[in-house]
Amino acid sequence: MEFCGFETKTVTYPDPAPGWVDGVYHERGARTVPGGEHVYVSRRFREREETGYGVYDYVEGTRFSFPAEYVDWRITVRVRADGGCKLDVFCDGMCVLSGAEAEPDGTELSFTVRSCSETSELAFAPAADGDAESSASLAVTEISRERVPVPEAKKIPTLFLASDSTVQTYDQYYYPQTGWGEVLYRFFTDAELVREYRPDGSTYSHCRAYGLPGVVIENRAIGGRSARSFCLEGKLSELLSRAARGDFMMIQFGHNDCTKARPNRYSDPDNYKSYIRRYVKSALSRGILPILVTPVSRRNCGENGVFSPSFAEYSEKLSELASEFGIPLLDLGSASLEILNILGADDSKRLYLHTDPGQYEGAYIGGAADNTHLSRTGALVYAGRVADMLSRSADGRLAALGSLVDRNRIDYITEALLGKRL
């Protein structure tokens, strides 16, 4: 069945979740019947797995799919609900409209979908009340779409950072914890003229922009996210809503993707690759250059004093995607591993969150021994490596960005921090 250009199907989740199998949690599988009706009952319920780290929302009823082609669409729909209800609208599992009123005699809703997939799928569900199950009798009587053009290039391009806690900007309370995205601007020309601010359209306080005369670095990294959860929480869509042709997007994930004990984050290497592909295609279709960055290394030191690679399988998937799409790859994983082996077991602690009790106020007043998250020193050293790779890249598409890097700052800051040049 096709309804006003949208194909329909009915989706239910009748079978219990398989649960934990070989250390990985498996959620419920969908049962799909082609040709869903535009008058139907929508049912919504939530399940939590036993550790509490996996939360899954399920919406049953008719789905409306359309060829989305990794671009933006304006959707207009007329929907009615028996007795009236508040309605949430989902696209590919992401909530794109929350708490809309659906009246018994029909309500017209209009919203923008920033698609991150080849084919997108809309679902309409009664607004949730905590974990309580809810249902509503709905009728979708009209639905249409119109492509939204990508904004033209700005005078000053934006470099977006999509990543996790190793890149995130932190409040003073967490000092000395620092993400390398927080200090990347320090290695650009006219860094002393930076204007730091929280950009429009950000739903989380850690998001910061660093305005420079030649580029704006918009750090949208947030802790605890994987390529999967950053996308499914709508954070990739938020980033895309800010972007224009000629912008850049650095993508570094891996730390949380490999954590099997956190079901909403975990992806095996192949699934990780499929999510990163969505970032790449979403950027390219909008005239944005994606820049893949292998995840910064953990401080994994063996008994022989030699550091071992981190996230090798995930980094390999990034390399495959860079070759497949012909896009830049910055191998920060290898660069950070090399620095660790230069510094050695003891001196390398300076790069990570190793602090003594009482050394700092705030979050780490009790001390820390953390080989994943970065100190201010580590963030600056690794941000310097990212800037160095940008400036030395042979990819002509990075020339304008690389020309803004001040190589003297790299050498000066690195030598001041470590007592040596790298």
Image: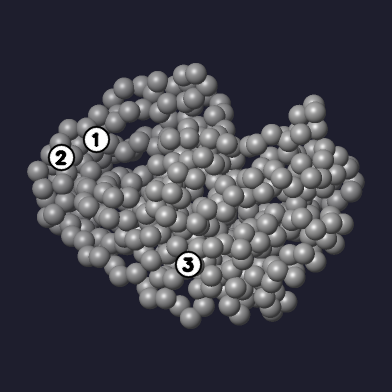
Discs 1, 3 touching: Cβ within 8 Å: no
Mark 2 or mark 1, which has the lower sequence index? 1
Q: Amino acid at mark 1?
A: Val
Residue 115, position as x, y percentages in the image: 33, 55
Residue 203 visible in this rendered orientation of the protein: no
Quarter occupied by residue 42: top left
Find residue 264 and report its horizontal and vertical position in percent.
Answer: 49, 36
Calculate the distance from the C-alpha at mark 1 to the C-alpha at mark 3: 44 Å
| Residue 98 percent location from the top left of the image | 38, 54
Under mark 3, the amino acid is: Arg
Reading the chain from its start, which is encountered first: label 3 or label 2? 2
Q: Mark 2: few, some, or many residues within 10 Å (few <14, many ≥20)?
A: many
Q: Which mark is residue 158?
A: none
Pointer 2 residue: 36
Q: Is residue 184 left or right of residue 82?
A: right
The type of colouring in the image is: one colour
- Rendered position, 122 above or below 108: above
Q: Which residue is depicted at the point 42% across and 26% down?
A: 26
Q: Nearer the viewer, residue 205 or 72?
A: 72
Label at residue 397: 3
Residue found at the far front of this picture: 394
What is the distance, in whole Å, between disc 2 and disc 1 at their CAs?
8 Å
Near-viewer residue (99 or 361)? 361
Looking at the image, tell me whether mark 1 or mark 3 is earlier in sequence order: 1
Callout 2 touching callout 1 (CB < 8 Å): yes
Q: CA distance from mark 3 to mark 2?
A: 46 Å
Tell me the tag on residue 11. 1
Q: Secondary structure at mark 3?
A: helix
Q: Is residue 35 visible?
A: yes
The structure residue drawn at horizontal position 40% and vertical position 70%, both measured from the top left corner, is 245
Mark 1 surroundings: few (<14), some (14-19) or many (≥20) residues within 10 A = many
